[in-house]
Image: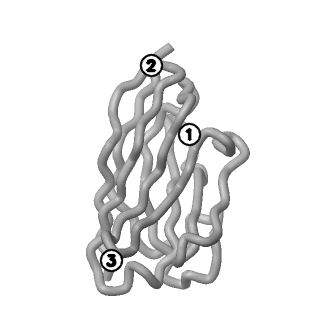
Amino acid sequence: QVQLVESGGGLVQAGGSLRLSCAASGRTFSRCAMGWFRQAPGKEREFVAAISRSGGNTYYADSVRGRFTISRDNAKNTVYLQMNSLQPEDTAAYYCAADSGGLGTSTFGYDYDYWGQGTQVTVSS
């Protein structure tokens, strides 16, 4: 199975940037589409971004499109989320997820088979 560990979260001022990393262990990483989700306190988990197996296709939630960039390096078994122009409403725990189906860039959490434990991103005003 695939194990995922997120890192790179922290405290940043509004307008700042962070890059999250998701390190994967497992022999089938390159066969998985990957996604990032986030969950703020008291809120439902929401889709942020997804990337196809080869990295050729990406998809973003409207709330982050143009500010966030998802990428992957299959040789390093790592997925990234570059977050620019961060705003307080971006404050949440961010989760990396792997879709073993690998057919596209799903926005639905139920399509993802493996999840990391999350990394906290806090954006101050």
Q: Which residue is tagged 2?
A: 13
Residue 60 vertical position relative to residue 33 in the rendered view, above or below: above
Amino acid type assigned to the residue bearing label 2 in the image:
Gln
Which mark identifies residue 120?
none
Disc 1 marks which residue? 43
Residue kind at label 1, given as amino acid type: Lys
Image quadrant in which you'd find residue 2? bottom left
Q: Give coordinates of residue 89: x percent, y percent.
A: 57, 28
Whichever of labels 3 and 2 marks the residue nearer the N terminus, that label is 3
**Foreground pick, 118 / 44:** 118
The residue labelled by disc 3 is 2
Colour mapping used in the image = one colour
**Mark 3 vs 2: CB contact within 8 A:** no
How crowded pointer 2 is (Cα within 10 Å; few <14, some 14-19, many 20+) is rated as some
Q: Nearer the viewer, residue 86 or 38?
A: 86
65 shown above or below 84? below
The structure residue drawn at horizontal position 36% and vertical position 39%, both measured from the top left corner, is 120
Residue drawn at (50%, 13%), measured in percent from left and top? 125
Image coords of residue 11 (percent x, y) = 35, 26
In the image: residue 103, left or right of residue 123: right
Residue at the top extreme? 125
- Residue in the picture at 52% in, 62% down: 35
Toward the viewer: 61 or 77? 77
